[in-house]
Amino acid sequence: MSAETAVTARTKPPARRVAMHVLLITLAVGMLYPLLWMLVSSLRENENIFTSAGLALTDATLANYVRGWDAQQNSFAIYFRNSFIVTGSVIMGNLIACSLTAFAFARMRFRLKALFMGIMLVTIMLPEHVTIVPQYILFSELGWLNTFLPLTVPKFFATDPFFIFLMVQFMRGIPRDIDEAASIDGCGPFQIYWRIMLPLVVPALATTAIFSFIWTWNDFFRPLVFLTDNDLFTVPLAIRLFVDLGGTDWGALFAMSVLSLVPIFIFFVFGQRYLIRGIATTGLK
Amino acid sequence: MSSLTEEKRRMPTPTLRPPSTPHSRRRRALAPYLFLSPWLIGLLVFVMGPMAASLYLSMTDYNFLQDPNFIGLDNFVRMFTSDPRYLSSVVVTATYVLVSVPLQLIFALALAMLLDRAIAGIAIYRAVFYLPSLIGTSVAVAVLWRTVFGSDGLVNGALGALGIDTTHSWVGNPDTALMTIIALNVWTFGSPMIIFLAGLRQIPRSYYEAAEVDGAGRVRRFLSITIPLLTPIVFFNFILQTIYAFQAFVPAYIVSNGQGGPADSTLFYTLYLYQQGFANFDMGYASAMAWVLLVVIAAITGINFVLSRYWVFYADGDR
């Protein structure tokens, strides 16, 4: 950071520049402090966790990770596998279904377009609590309770309208000449969608994939409602067990909490640019 | 000469396209609906159908085991007349929305303004301030919060370092438990901050330069240029964060072991709905609660849209 500061210091009085960075760094450290403390605590011996609010790590140990990994009924390997199965399917479903819908909205003409578009936008604001009880009954009738199906199947039917909206916005920015030319060359609508539009909206697809991952990975409410069999638990449900059992193994709890955030950090680091763009255009959380 | 005729031959003319028959026209008219069919099916099966069912269930005593009995508006009457826990969940949620959303937006705007200039490493700062937004609803962070505000957590440690000795558990005390969850929501100001930043970037620098030449000070420029030009963004953020805040669930669930305690001080609306629907299996009542939530969110959003006419300023004069 200091090297970059030196470079831009040319333009304004250095004192003000430095003061600005001191302020921002202080705020940033304050923001991240709880997370850093959790990371450090996960590496401390249990009896030392609450003795210091500082971040100094004198006796780093991985014991919490070893103990935490097998602390629940199943190994965390199972919970991670479950979470990856669910998030992987959700990403696939959202990419396919939302892009098809968005293509129709952005590029095709049909009579009910305005009406459908309006419905789609309104459903963005719909709280999931309004549909969760009847969905529970529906999935119970179908025999889908205690399977991953309630968490994944609806996504193949474009039930995350945010992503449709995101892709429509994106597709509208692509010049119409391109698909008109393709149409004159004899491409049907599906070919235009598949061979021309999708490659051009890769940033929107990436944004959708990253947000799908993070939301699904973090999701607690739906797995809590639809899954009761421990073998099928996702990572958030497994972490909640530590809390529910009222245990005091804080080290193990923090260790698994840190691990549960690792995939999100990875997606965050690689997808930051897409995430920021997605938020700026649609207000996604 | 030959190349020219070749050129001519390759030029596509409209008449070369297959003649449009009634059959192919029908197929083209059908194509949009084919593309939309997954969404349409999903809308019917997972959204509209369940909404209709939920509206019906809200007027029944359905408990998942026995067939529903139609009881009219009894569930709604019960909510407002004989269910003190429901009323406390309304108060908790209203307090949360009213306090945390404005605070969150103030932080978001303040940080966006700090970052809206050529600063070295702005991408890093932006990422750091945004990060909590991404993980704020995760169980891991809720667990962290529970510990940080616990009796020997980080907050008391920090106060101890300042010479204020306290063994008070912030999450265990009904007076402060809700405040800790409000703090969590304020901490996730990153996503409105990004939207503010995008909005600030749209304001032409020349406005500020002209105002400066006219002798307008910092405060004056903020009040007369930044705020009016940013009102559409403030409005957008306000609507979105309000809708999200009404639906907060995870922190309340984790901080209170799913109970909403201590003394119902963190009994959020959605948490009580979950308890009624999926712990007590009083699904008729839970459906009624969900509909009240939907109506309240829709009403507040609608009122905000109406009020926005008086304070949201669109540069092109469009309303």
Image: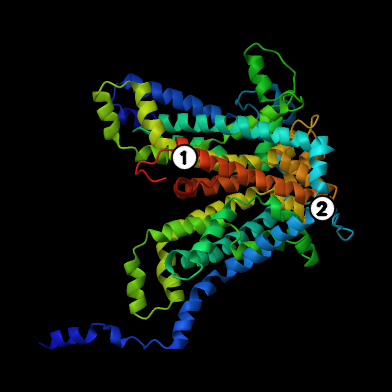
- The residues tagged by marks 2 and 1 sit, at their Cα atoms, a distance apart of 38 Å
Rendered-image quadrant of the N terminus of chain B: bottom left
In the displayed structure, A185 sits above or below B238; it is below
Q: How is the image coloured?
A: rainbow
Q: Are marks 2 and 1 in contact (CB under 8 Å)?
A: no
From the viewer's side, name the closer residue of A74 and B314: B314
Q: Amino acid at mark 2?
A: Gly
Q: Amino acid at mark 1?
A: Arg
Query: What residue appears at the point 79 percent right and 63 percent down from the top-left corner?
Result: A140
Residue A42 locus on image (x, y percent) = 67, 35
| Residue under pointer 1 | B309
> Is A282 on the left or on the right of B260, as rendered?
left
In the displayed structure, B165 sits above or below A193; it is above
Q: For label 1, count other residues whose C-alpha is less than 10 Å away and answer few (under 14), some (14-19) or many (20+).
A: few
Q: Identify the subunit bearing mark 1.
A: B
Q: For label 2, count other residues whose C-alpha is less than 10 Å away and answer few (under 14), some (14-19) or many (20+).
A: some
In the displayed structure, B9 sits above or below A202; it is below
Query: What residue appears at the point 51 percent right and 78 percent down from the top-left corner?
Result: B30
From the viewer's side, name the closer residue of B13 and B149: B13
Looking at this view, name the residue that lies furthest to the top. Answer: B163
Residue A18 locus on image (x, y percent) = 37, 22
Query: What residue appears at the point 72 percent right and 48 percent down from the top-left corner?
Result: B290
Q: Identify the subunit bearing mark 2.
A: B
Query: What residue appears at the point 45 percent right and 34 percent down from the top-left corner?
Result: B125
Residue B136 locus on image (x, y percent) = 61, 39
Of callouts 2 and 1, the N-terminal one: 2
> Is A256 on the left or on the right of B186, as rendered?
right
| Residue under pointer 2 | B72
Looking at this view, name the residue that lies furthest to the right. Answer: B66
> Which label belongs to residue A22?
none
